[in-house]
């Protein structure tokens, strides 16, 4: 998974970029997958809006692969909504969209706009599932 997305870190390894730094935090940190989805200050702001304060230490503690796997397989360290894995997936997708918006359109989406996009996407999926008769997974 770490090589699948073309973060700047992976682009640099393939000689597609001069540096591998994060486009969101003023080019200070290396843009790895882990940085993009969890450790970047801008990603953390988003997670801190989704994860209750009492669960945040645990949420950010595990190794990145465990973190991704637990949250995507509905065995999360937190349970904010019944279908946390769907919400988690929506947040990851929007974090990647936000990153690309900055890279390709030089537009920065603030945390408020980012949160609105995540909840919108989440509601769309929940409505679609409900209209289709529901799934036990959700
Ligand atoms: Zn960053």
Image (cartoon, grey):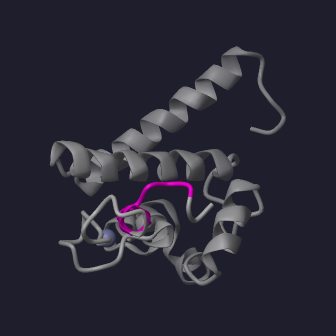
**Image location (x, y in percent) of residue 46:** 39, 61
118 lies left or right of 124: left
Q: Farthest right residue?
A: 136
Q: Image quarter for residue 17?
A: bottom left
Q: Residue at x 62, y 21 (%)?
A: 128
Q: From the viewer's perspective, is residue 1 above or below residue 90?
A: below
Between 113 and 15, the one lying in front of the other is: 15
94 within the magenta span: no
> What is the span of residues highlighted in magenta in the rendered image?
4-12
**Image location (x, y in percent) of residue 111:** 28, 56
Q: From the viewer's perspective, is residue 31 above or below residue 112?
A: below
**Image location (x, y in percent) of residue 41:** 33, 73
The answer to whether residue 109 is seen in the rendering is no
Between 33 and 80, the one lying in front of the other is: 33
Q: Ligand 1, what quadrant? A: bottom left
Q: Residue at x 48, y 60 (%)?
A: 50
Q: Residue at x 49, y 75 (%)?
A: 53
Look at the image and tell me in which quarter the C terminus lies.
top right
The answer to whether residue 53 is seen in the rendering is yes
Number of numbered labels in the structure image: 0
Between 38 and 80, the one lying in front of the other is: 38
Q: From the viewer's perspective, is residue 17 above or below residue 88?
A: below
Q: Image quarter for residue 59?
A: bottom right
Between 40 and 125, the one lying in front of the other is: 40
Look at the image and tell me in which quarter the N terminus lies.
bottom right
Q: Farthest front residue?
A: 15
Q: From the viewer's perspective, is residue 19 above or below residue 91?
A: below
Q: Residue at x 44, y 44 (%)?
A: 118
Q: Image quarter for residue 75?
A: bottom right
14 lies left or right of 69: left
40 lies left or right of 51: left
């Amino acid at each position: 998974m770490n090589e699948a997305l073309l973060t700047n870190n992976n682009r640099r390894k393939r000689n597609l970029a001069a540096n591998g730094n994060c486009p969101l935090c003023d080019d200070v940190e290396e843009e790895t997958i882990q940085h993009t989805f969890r450790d970047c200050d801008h990603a953390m702001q988003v997670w801190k809006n989704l994860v209750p304060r009492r669960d945040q230490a645990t949420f950010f503690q595990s190794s990145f692969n465990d973190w991704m796997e637990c949250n995507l397989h509905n065995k999360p360290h937190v349970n904010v909504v019944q279908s946390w894995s769907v919400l988690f997936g929506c947040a990851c997708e929007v974090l990647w969209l936000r990153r690309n918006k900055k890279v390709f359109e030089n537009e920065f989406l603030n945390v408020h706009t980012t949160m609105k996009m995540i909840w919108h996407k989440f509601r769309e999926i929940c409505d679609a599932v409900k209209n289709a008769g529901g799934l036990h997974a959700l």
